[in-house]
Image (cartoon, rainbow, N blue to C red):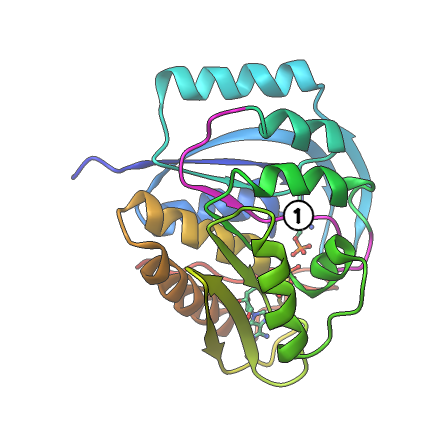
Amino acid sequence: MKQPPIALTIAGSDSGGGAGIQADLKTFAAHKVFGTSVVTALTAQNTSGVLGVHATPLHFLALQLDAVLSDLPPVAVKTGMLASPEVIAYLATRDLPNLVVDPVMVASTGKPLFTGAADAYRELFARALVVTPNLPETRELLDRDVATVEDMAAAAHELAALGPRCVVVKGGHLAGDAVDVVWHGGELSYLRGARVSTPNNHGTGCTFAAAVTAHLALGSSLPAALRAAKTYVTRALAGSADWRLGSGHGPLSWKEI
Ligand SMILES: Nc1ncnc2c1ncn2[C@@H]1O[C@H](COP(=O)(O)OP(=O)(O)OP(=O)(O)O)[C@@H](O)[C@H]1O
Ligand SMILES: Cc1ncc(COP(=O)(O)O)c(N)n1
């Protein structure tokens, strides 16, 4: 078997298996990328909600990161739930290649996973190759309403001023087609996909960002990685549209590519 490239996810554990570290490692494996992980928090979580969060002490998070970087250098790195503003600020001091920042702040069930992150994220964004906020996160980051594709375009432009090479404002929470707005190299473009009708959308954001990270690890250009990730998440959603795992928002499937 060909040796796989290495990717790293820095994210929280979802005991329900649908989002967080579990979604990221599943997605890396589906892309034949070797996944390493730094666990930022344990969440007691299922398809209906988050029962509790137990954050990893910062010194131990740093030790996990040192252990990975010193022995298994990743080609690309993704961040998910970072559990506190201090963790976000700490990661902004580290050298993380091909950094994909998914600024997770709120679970799809609506419960905030932690608070006070918006300001801290501004620093980490400056170090990112690409940032991938969803609509509620974009509102939180800019402290204003973002509701339409036009609003998303203005928001992507504004977030790009913080320094990431690329911004993807994800439209999974729009009514109608699932359109994501991309700001890259001074130009706007769109990732368009038909909406899959399914209650099983827990972990779509994690899966999209992990698929981008996997494609970057495999050597794709950023525009190609974004297009491939959009195709992947749409297929994964379609593959589990009829699943009945859990009584709330179930997880999406994974697909070998
Ligand atoms: N029902 C759907 N059908 C097709 N694509 C979708 C659907 N829901 C989300 N997507 C796509 O999945 C990706 C993740 O988007 P979304 O806005 O849902 O992120 P998120 O809110 O971070 O995810 P989550 O729902 O896990 O919180 C985007 O490419 C989005 O367009
Ligand atoms: C540990 C962890 N990380 C990320 C998410 C966001 O995913 P979703 O928005 O699908 O709930 C989550 N719920 N839990």
Residue count near mark 1 (Cα–Cα under 10 Å), binned few <14, some 14–19, many ≥20: many
> Measuring 76% from the left and 61% from the top, which residue is drawn there?
139
User: Is residue 153 a member of the stretch shown in magenta?
Assistant: no
Amino acid type at mark 1: Gly
Q: Residue at position x 53%, y 57% from top?
A: 167
From the image, which quarter does the N terminus lie in? top left
Q: Looking at the magenta stretch, what is its main secondary structure? A: loop
Q: Position of residue 198 (x, y in %)?
A: 61, 76
What percent of the width, then of the height, locates residue 159? 62, 55
Q: Position of residue 112 (x, y in %)?
A: 81, 49
Foreground pick, 52 / 127: 127
Res. 126 image quadrant = top right
Left or right of 26, for residue 228: left
* Residue 100 shown in magenta: yes
Q: Residue at x 64, y 48 (%)?
A: 103
Can residue 107 be seen from the camera position used here?
A: no
Q: Position of residue 240 (x, y in %)?
A: 52, 69
**Judging from the image, what secondary structure is the residue with disc 1 in?**
loop
Camera-nearest residue between 157 and 121: 157
**Is residue 229 depicted above or below 7 in this figure?**
below
| Magenta stretch in the rendered image | 94-111
Question: Considering the image in quadrants, where does the C terminus appear?
Answer: bottom left
Residue at the disc numbered 1: 16
Q: Is residue 154 left or right of residue 216?
A: right
